[in-house]
């Protein structure tokens, strides 16, 4: 009883400390500072607007607009992201006179594709300062439901594709060998597993379409862009995010090609490598990739996803595999089920430890 009370007190202390020590995390391309500053009153008109963000901005999908009080646009339109500092975005201005001007901006992170928008005013010359407080600096971000669905589909589908190899090699086949080596084809490779594999491939394809159209839709102000819209082509061809989406599609097509060949060791390993590569593309668009030194954080995120895939994907194959044992004699089925549950529990424990340790490292970052 005393031991349990001490454990409870320790967990409570850790929880309180975690809440007390929390620090801000700047996810997405958040505006850090600007030149001129928000609500500044300048003696001389600026020749350009400079914005500095917490993450690199994608030049193709981001923009800056500057308006006068009449709603007229006074920027030249030459929005640029500094190649030497991709967190810096600028736009030149036409010659402007005294008055109040409003800067509006849209920044799409070149790393994770999330979009933030905002605006702020500044004044030039002989202007009534009392007019400025009515226009405060604002920043907002929005992740469309379509983007969330695409992300969920990607993760679930990748777990099905990657988890199959781990479950067969470490759980299923060893369990069969320990239980008199049951070798019928319906037991060695249940038909339901082929369906799960194809569901995973179809999920990747659907996530590709939904994710690209959602990204392009954010650019043109819609929930989803049309496949033939100009913005869709810009996302696919002109951005790092589009390249990663195309790589995911290519990996899914490799999976389709592999499924047309007879099962063998080379196919199993090739399919596993395809799944790992797919997971790695997720890590390349994660918040870990925005770290100043991203190698270890990205690898940490990748291992985190591998642990998730082994647990979640393996669970799907365990539940569907148990149904294929219905034709076995009751005693043999009970013994095999017990072995499978025991071995899967061990793999699940390792997976959860990976998820916990890598999650802790991410929390520290």
Image: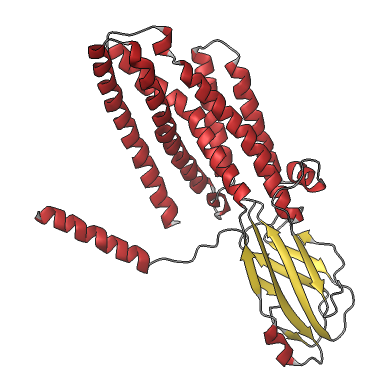
Q: Is residue 208 visible?
A: yes
The colour mode here is: secondary structure
Q: Is residue 284 visible?
A: no
Residue 73 spot, x, y in % from top left: 86, 71
* Image position of 157 with respect to 125: above or below: above
Apparent side of residue 82 relative to residue 282 in the rendered image (left or right)? right
The quarter of the picture where residue 354 lies is top left
* Image position of 19 with respect to 2: above or below: below
Residue 251 spot, x, y in % from top left: 62, 29
Quadrant for the C terminus in the image:
bottom left
The quarter of the picture where residue 119 lies is bottom right
* Image position of 299 with respect to 71: above or below: above
Tag count: 0
Which residue ends up furthest to the right in the rendered image?
95
Front residue (pair 315, 298): 315
Quadrant for the N terminus in the image:
bottom left
Front residue (pair 344, 206): 206
Residue 282 spot, x, y in % from top left: 56, 41
Apparent side of residue 338 relative to residue 135 in the rendered image (left or right)? left
Residue 175 spot, x, y in % from top left: 31, 17
Residue at horizontal 41%, vertical 56%? 364
Front residue (pair 157, 242): 157
Residue at horizontal 69%, vertical 60%? 107
Apparent side of residue 318 relative to residue 276 in the rendered image (left or right)? left
């Amino acid at each position: 009883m005393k031991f349990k009370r001490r454990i409870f007190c320790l967990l409570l202390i850790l929880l309180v400390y975690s809440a007390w020590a929390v620090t801000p995390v700047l996810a997405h391309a958040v505006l850090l500072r600007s030149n001129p500053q928000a609500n500044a009153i300048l003696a001389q008109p600026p020749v350009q607007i400079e914005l500095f963000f917490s993450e690199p901005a994608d030049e193709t999908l981001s923009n800056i607009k500057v308006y006068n009080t009449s709603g007229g646009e006074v920027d030249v339109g030459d929005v640029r992201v500094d190649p030497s500092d991709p967190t810096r975005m600028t736009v030149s201005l036409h010659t402007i006179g005294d008055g109040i001007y409003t800067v509006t901006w849209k920044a799409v992170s070149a790393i994770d594709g999330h979009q933030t928008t905002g605006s702020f005013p500044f004044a030039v010359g002989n202007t009534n300062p009392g007019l400025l407080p009515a226009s405060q600096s604002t920043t907002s971000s929005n992740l469309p439901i379509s983007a969330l669905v695409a992300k969920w589909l990607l993760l679930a589908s990748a777990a099905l594709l990657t988890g199959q190899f781990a479950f067969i090699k470490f759980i299923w086949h060893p369990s069969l060998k320990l239980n008199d080596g049951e070798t019928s084809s319906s037991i060695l490779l249940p038909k339901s597993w082929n369906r799960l594999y194809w569901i995973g491939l179809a999920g990747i394809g659907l996530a590709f379409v939904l994710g690209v159209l959602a990204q392009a839709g954010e650019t043109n102000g819609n929930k989803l862009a049309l496949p033939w819209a100009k913005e869709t082509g810009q996302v696919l061809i002109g951005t790092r995010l589009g390249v990663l989406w195309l790589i995911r599609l290519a990996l899914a097509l490799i999976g389709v090609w592999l499924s047309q060949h007879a099962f063998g060791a080379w196919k199993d390993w090739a399919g596993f490598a395809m799944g790992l590569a797919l997971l790695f593309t997720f890590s390349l668009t994660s918040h870990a990739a925005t770290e100043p030194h991203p190698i270890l954080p990205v690898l940490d995120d990748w291992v985190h996803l591998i642990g998730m895939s082994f647990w979640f994907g393996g669970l799907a194959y365990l539940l569907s595999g148990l149904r294929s044992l219905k034709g076995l004699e009751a005693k043999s089925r009970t013994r095999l089920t017990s072995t499978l549950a025991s071995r899967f529990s061990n793999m699940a424990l390792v997976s959860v430890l990976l998820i916990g340790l890598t999650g802790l490292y991410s929390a520290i970052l």
